[in-house]
Amino acid sequence: MAAAQMKLDHNRTLARRFFDEILNQPEPSAIEEIVTEDYREWAKPICGDAAPGAVNGPDHLRRVVGGLHQTYPDIHITVDKVIADGDEVAAYVTASGTQGTGEGKHFSVSQCHWFRVKDGRLGEHWAAREDLPMLVQLGMVECPPM
């Protein structure tokens, strides 16, 4: 197998591991293997005014995972498609879960995530999520009449 193809396979595998071994696990153990220490997070939080930029990858992801699993104990992200081009990887996923507080409503939405690979690990992350449909499904936001 050519070196370039091996690199693309490695990068696709890293993206899948991000979801399977980090976000889907309440106590992820593979964080240090998957993301760099100087990981940059460009995805805006659901409730917030700006993307955080430079974060400590492992510590940041532990907080994110802890918050996700506290709010949605059964959260699961299914990787539907992953493509890679050089050091960039894109993943189309389906995120679903049940709210662990309040009425326990369920959500299921699509998301697109982009990563830049640096030194064999994920160094940057961007996301386009369906936050509004998720909030509507959870009953946190009402849709206006159509």
Image (cartoon, rainbow, N blue to C red):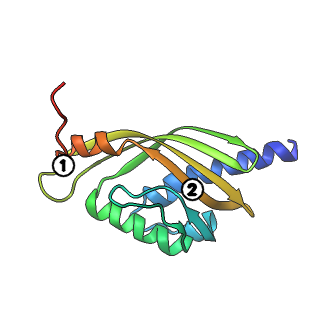
Of 122 and 50, nearer the camera is: 50
Of 69 and 146, nearer the camera is: 146
Residue 84 horizontal/vertical position (percent): 69, 42
Task: Kindly identify the residue that appears in the image at 57 percent across and 56 percent down.
Answer: 125
The residue at which mark 2 appears reads as 125
Amino acid tagged 2: His
Q: Is residue 78 left or right of residue 106?
A: right
Residue 122 horizontal/vertical position (percent): 64, 60
Q: Residue furthest left?
A: 103
Q: Where is the N terminus found, in terms of image quarters? A: top right
Eyeballing the image, is 87 above or below 123? above
Of 38 and 67, nearer the camera is: 38
Q: Is residue 78 left or right of residue 81?
A: left
How packed mark 1 is, by other alpha carbons closer than 10 Å (few <14, some 14-19, many 20 or more), is few
Eyeballing the image, is 140 above or below 71? above
The mark found on residue 109 in the picture is: none
Of 88 and 34, nearer the camera is: 88
Tag 1 or tag 2, which sits nearer the N-term? 2
Which of the 4 image quarters holds residue 26? bottom left
Q: Where is the C terminus found, in terms of image quarters? A: top left
Q: Is residue 115 left or right of residue 105?
A: right
Task: Kindly identify the residue that appears in the image at 19 percent across and 45 percent down.
Answer: 141
Marks 2 and 1, how far apart in space?
A: 27 Å
Q: Which residue lies furthest to the right in this view?
A: 2
Eyeballing the image, is 130 above or below 44? above
Task: Kindly identify the residue that appears in the image at 64 percent across and 49 percent down.
Answer: 13
How packed mark 2 is, by other alpha carbons closer than 10 Å (few <14, some 14-19, many 20 or more), is many
Residue 99 horizontal/vertical position (percent): 22, 53
The residue at which mark 1 appears reads as 140
Amino acid tagged 1: Met
Could you say whether the residue bearing mark 1 is in a helix, strand or loop? loop
Which of the 4 image quarters holds residue 108? top left
